[in-house]
Image (spheres, rainbow, N blue to C red):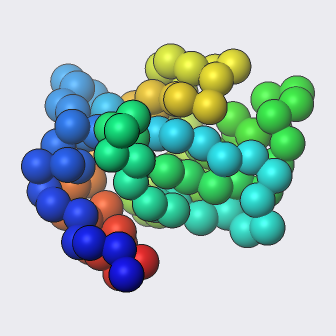
């Protein structure tokens, strides 16, 4: 059984931005289902996300955006990949999502895994 994810761990992956929350992700492509959060990678200090799309033609990036937007209940236009567009390690900006709200909802979801 996975140990509960602590608030301090998530704080390493979620930071404040003037427009919302910045979240560090580790992406697995070609999964059976889209899943966010899919875990916490303590070595990379990133929240894991799994998407069904392949990493070709920006499909995985758009799937990451859609999946994160749905998770935070915000419009797709409010999620931006601000770094790592060609990497498994991506950083997103979730506009109009506070750091505290992001950490709380992520912690609740991760501890349910």
Quadrant housing the N terminus: bottom left
Give the number of callouts: 0
In the rendering, at what x and y percent does residue 39 appear? 44, 60
User: Is 97 located above or below residue 5 in the figure?
Assistant: above
- Residue at image position (81%, 52%) is 30
Quadrant in which residue 44 is drawn? top left
Quadrant in which residue 35 is drawn? bottom right
In the rendering, at what x and y percent does residue 87 appear? 64, 23
- Residue at image position (22%, 26%) is 17
- Residue at image position (11%, 49%) is 8
In the rendering, at what x and y percent does residue 92 appear? 45, 32
Residue 13 versus residue 95: which sits nearer the camera?
13
User: Is 35 located above or below residue 55 in the figure?
Assistant: below
Quadrant housing the C terminus: bottom left
Give left or right: position of 94 versus 84: left
Give left or right: position of 8 versus 32: left
Residue 30 visible here: yes
User: Is 104 located above or below residue 98 in the figure?
Assistant: below
Residue 69 visible here: no
Residue 9 versus residue 56: which sits nearer the camera?
9
Give left or right: position of 26 versus 111: right
Quadrant in which residue 31 is drawn? bottom right
- Residue at image position (49%, 51%) is 48
User: Is 40 located above or below residue 84 in the figure?
Assistant: below
């Amino acid at each position: 059984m996975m140990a509960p994810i602590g608030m301090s761990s998530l704080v390493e992956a979620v930071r404040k931005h003037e427009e919302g929350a910045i979240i560090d992700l580790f992406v697995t492509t070609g999964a059976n289902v889209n899943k966010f959060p899919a875990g916490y990678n303590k070595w990379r200090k990133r929240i894991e996300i799994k998407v069904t799309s392949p990493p070709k033609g920006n499909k995985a990036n758009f799937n990451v955006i859609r999946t994160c937007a749905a998770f935070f209940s915000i419009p797709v236009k409010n999620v931006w990949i601000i770094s790592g567009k060609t990497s498994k390690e991506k950083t997103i900006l979730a506009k109009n999502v506070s750091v505290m709200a992001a950490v709380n909802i992520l912690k609740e979801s991760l501890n349910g895994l």
